Image (spheres, rainbow, N blue to C red):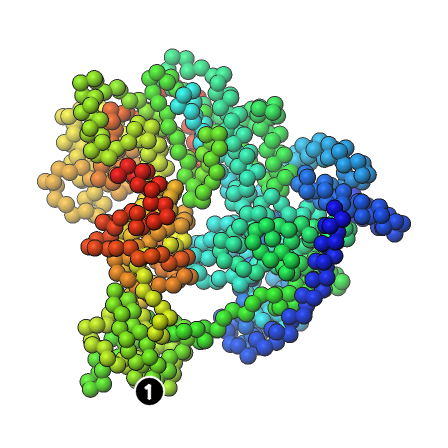
Amino acid sequence: MATSVALHKFYRHLLSKSDFPKFISAFSTCNVSFAAAKNAPVAAARAKVHCNVGTIGHVDHGKTTLTAAITRVQAKTGLAKFVAYDQIDKAPEEQRRGITINATHVEYDSPLRHYAHTDCPGHRDYVKNMISGTSQMDGAILVVAATDGHMPQTREHLLLAKQIGVSHIIVFLNKTDLVDLETLELCEIEMRELLTDYGYDGLATPVVSGSALKALEGDLEAEKCIAKLMDVLDSYLPEPRRDTTSPFLFPIENAFSVAQRGIVAIGTLVRGRIKKGDSAEILGHGSELKTVIADVQVFRQSVPFVEAGQNCGLLLRNVKPDQLDRGMIVCPPKISKAYNHFKAQLYFLTKHEGGRNKPVRSGYQQQMFSYTWNMEARIDLRPPMEMLMPGDNGEVYVALRKHMVLEPQQRFTIREANQSTVATGVITSLLPDVLVEKTLSKVSDADLLNEVAKEVKTKRGK
Amino acid sequence: MRICVLLARGTQTLLQQRLFSTTATQAVNKTALATLRKKTGYTFSNCKKALDQFGDDLASAEKWLRDQAQKEGWAKATKLQDRVVSQGLIGVRYSPEDGTAVLLEVNCETDFVARNAKFHELVNTVAEACSRELQLKAVDGASYHKWSITPELLASFKSSHDKTLGDLTALSIGTLGENIVLRRALLVKINSKECKISGYAHASDSLPTSKCCYLGRYGALVIYRQSPPSSKTNTATEQVAEQAGLLSSEDIGRQLCQHIVGMNPESIGKMDDDVPEVIVPVRKEAVVDTRGEGENDEPVEEVVPVAADDESRLIYQEFLTEPTMTVRDVLEQNNMEVLDFVRFELGGKTQEAEATDSERG
């Protein structure tokens, strides 16, 4: 038992050190975030980095109180608009890409960053949020009442965070005004152990303790915990990567010939930056072409480069008109690759959301849409899953009739013949190619679910 | 709660006093608190209270905590009773050997709790208690008997540890800190000489299955009769079944349940239409139905039975496992007849009509 005390001292020591990385974030102010510019509560936020955070934790441990307290404390210095407790807790149903998600959003600033703060009531809401992909959480604040310690379902909260790709967790030990120091210390040790058990860096995870209720009521001493929490958010959560620095990705919307010059492909640059003279590859629909960007045009004016978000035309060298097709991707050589087989998380819309009213089983074939392309796709459920109901989400294997440029985290939708979106998904990992001879129905099950092929075969009795 | 807060504050001052007197006591106390919490899993404040009463006598403290848990559970249950419970699980437990089946729903506040092993354990225990209750019931000569159990009656059932389900639920409320409600249960007993029973629970997340209890967000039971194929046609039928890639009757029963979960039929549909003379009008009707929907432009001349998209009669729906066939085709091929089915959906409506014992067969 003496070891636990010693360990604890070590943690404390680490904690006091964790304040140092603060200066790193000072460099971040030069970055521009589009999201921040749109919704910023104060004009100064224009220049701030935008981060998405969420709160997770047991219903009675004070998530909403904490959120309200943050806005109240930050509002004092003009960094937020105060949102009262009862205004937050309504959990309105909001529509995102046609999907109803139970979520509340609050925003506030730290001196360095702009934060969009999400809270969802349930596991399924978080997963839907992740799949539809509008706000990938950069970090989560796990709220635990020090009076109770972690609850049995805290494990489920951590599993969720893992599942939706939250790599950074900050622990807020709440209700510390009701416990003594020893309990608080034990509670902290316990949380660090639990985090480590679930694959997080329990030793490095910042733990902030305080009383959200007191801070909300205006207790000056208690407000310090909010300031501490904001510091930790700024220093511990990594800065979201700027899109203009990643390799460029340009999905072709359409293409036409310009007399004596060549082929111009039109589209919107999804990310990165394209300069005149860049060499590039054109991938998708089963073909692979090499080219050079001979010219970049915006509104028919030649420009030296374009950046993410801009609509432009690219003059492509060495390409024939019949070689290009809508949905092909222009990208730097040897960066992207075309695949026809991958694993994904898929959410089926409910009837109410415009989706199907019947379940889906393995072998389901429909059109998949992503960027500017669509392609016939076959969806197989991961065994032992036998069907997915509307409103369910699950892990699936997808095979495409032709190779397309795919990468993990890419979002897509599935639409049925009447053009209604029935599912939305996110690619989780890319798999070895499957052999598609003529139709997707004839692709062998063994290829589709290679690591679990045996199970499926016997189940289907084929 | 106020008392609890005061108590916690009281302990705080007590401990601070102790802290100043000797550092040794403090270390022992902290270790004791950590041990007790780790061992029992009860909240820090309760462990603290226990140690406060029994000093370093861990055994007594633990015993006190366990005794206290039931009381605290009920107190918590009373406190949380008005909170909305929209999540939870459907449990399905059936035993073809005993001819018994249980379909039940337990609700909680968030799906985080619904995913926790402690909650799964509670649902399992409820299912087990229902099965034990079923052992005492008799079918009284009927082919099968259904009992709809009210939440009050359900709470009075005893678990194998001789605690009522109500007590166990209160304990779980104490541990998980959420309102939990035993919402409904349906018990079925069949005369196994005449009919069979099958069940299925659907969950998109992999939930553990233990002691024959399946967990999910949907569940269904189906009661069916299978006439033994006459010895002459026996081998022929088997061959046909093999060719069609069909499975044993248990598998079919399970697939029927899956179909019921997925396609949500409202009624079985009349098997009387099965007489050859009636087949044609039925087919016409099916065609007319689809034309009425405006979703199918097939000419009336084509006498292929097409299941309408919104067909609510089980036997006329297309079979989920093999959409080229209707459920009736599958039943005919296997000499089967569906006598009854029940479908539970999480948060679905409880059927008041089923409140009274229904007896058929």
Please identify the residue farthest to the right as the structure is shown: B21
- Identify residue for label 1: A302
Give left or right: position of A236 versus A254. right
Location of the C terminus of chain A by quadrant is: top left
Q: Position of residue A279 (x, y in %)?
A: 33, 79
Q: Quadrant of residue B47?
A: top right
Q: Residue at x 33, y 54 (%)?
A: A398
Tell me residue A154's x, y (percent).
59, 48
Q: Is residue A393 left or right of residue A157?
A: left
Residue drawn 24% across the image and 24% down it: B335
Position of residue B340 in the picture relative to residue A214 (left or right) = left
Question: What's the residue at 26%, 19% (across, down)?
Answer: B228
Q: Is residue B44 above or below residue A333?
A: above
Seen as rendered, the residue at the extreme top is B141
Q: How many marks?
A: 1
**Is residue B328 in view?**
no
Residue B324 location, x and y as percent?
22, 40
Q: Is residue B315 above or below residue A101?
A: above
Q: Residue at (71%, 48%) from the top-left corner?
A: A147
Front-lying residue, B67 or A422: B67
Q: Which residue occupies the foreground of this view, B18 or B149?
A: B18
Q: Quadrant of residue B301?
A: top left
The chain carrying label 1 is A
Circle 1 residues within 10 Å: few <14, some 14–19, many ≥20: some
Front-most of residues B316 and A427:
A427
Residue B77 is situated, as x and y percent measured from the top left of the image, at 63, 36
Residue A401 in sight = yes
Per the image, label 1 sits on a secondary structure element best described as strand
- The three-letter code of the residue at mark 1 reads Ser
